[in-house]
Amino acid sequence: MSGQRGGTVRWWWVRHAPVPDGGRIYGQHDLDCDCSEEHIFAALAKCLPTNALWITSHLARTKQTATALRAAMGGAGGEPVIVPEFAEQHLGEWQGLARTEFFASREQRHHFWFGPANEQPPGGESFGDLVERAKAAIVRLTREHVDRDIIAVGHGGTIKAALALALDLDPEACLAFVIDNCSITRLDYLGGDARYHWRVAAVNHRPWADAEFSGQSIRLA
C-alpha cells in the first residue's frame, strides 16, 4: 500500500448467511443461503454504516445476504459492486463430496480446514492462492476508496485473507480464526507513506448474541 497518504478506510466484513449444504463440501459451488433469521439481520443493521460502498463476491450467497442486510437497513446504499476475487476457495474435485467421507479418507485431518494452506485440491486452488488473490483486490479497493466505509459481504476464507493482510500473517496461521455466518470483522486501514497500517477493531463479532453473555459470570477453570 506504499504511496497512499492519510485517509482511513473502514472495512466491515460480513460473512454470508448459512448455506443448507446437505453435509457436502461446497467451496465455489453457487448455492443459496438461508436469510430467514430476521433478528440476526436486525442486529447487524444497527452496527453497519448507512453510507458505505457495498461489495460482494459473484456467488449467490453473498448477494442474497447483502440484499437481506440492505432491506433490514431500509435500503441503505447502492447496488453492491461484484468482486470475483472475493469468492471462496475453489476446492476443485473436493466440491460435492460428503464431509464425513472426505475426512474419513484423509490420513491426517487438519484441525481447522479441509487441508493445509498450501495444499491444492485436484482441479482447484490452495488456500494460499485464495489469500493472494483476495489481498490484491483489497489493496486495490483500499487505494480507490480513501475515507470510505466499505461493507464487504464475503466468505470465511476471504475474511481470513483480509486478516492475513492486516496482521501480516502466514496463510496457515489464518486458518485458526473462527468466522461465523453473518459475523462482522472490522478492519481499518489508517493510511501512511512508506508503509501501511491496519487496526483490527473486531473479529467474528455476533451482535445478535450479546444477550447470551449478559449477566453471565466468566469461569477461568
Image (cartoon, helix red, strand yellow):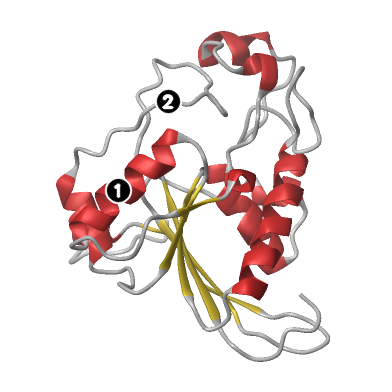
Q: Amino acid at mark 2?
A: Leu
Q: Marks 2 and 1, Cα distance to the nearest angstrom?
A: 16 Å
Q: Is residue 200 left or right of residue 45?
A: right
Q: Which residue is mark 1?
A: 67
Residue 201 spot, x, y in % from top left: 49, 74
- The reply to whether residue 212 is visible in this rendering is no
Residue for point 19% across, 38% down: 36
Position of 62 relative to 216 (above/below): above
What's the mark number on residue 31?
2
Say what secondary structure mark 2 lies in. loop
Residue 174 spot, x, y in % from top left: 66, 51
Total number of numbered discs in the rendering: 2
Residue 151 in which image quadrant: bottom left
Front-most of residues 44 and 216: 44
Residue 11 spot, x, y in % from top left: 51, 68
Say what secondary structure mark 1 lies in. helix
Where the N terminus falls, by quadrant?
Answer: bottom right
Q: Is residue 52 left or right of residue 214?
A: right
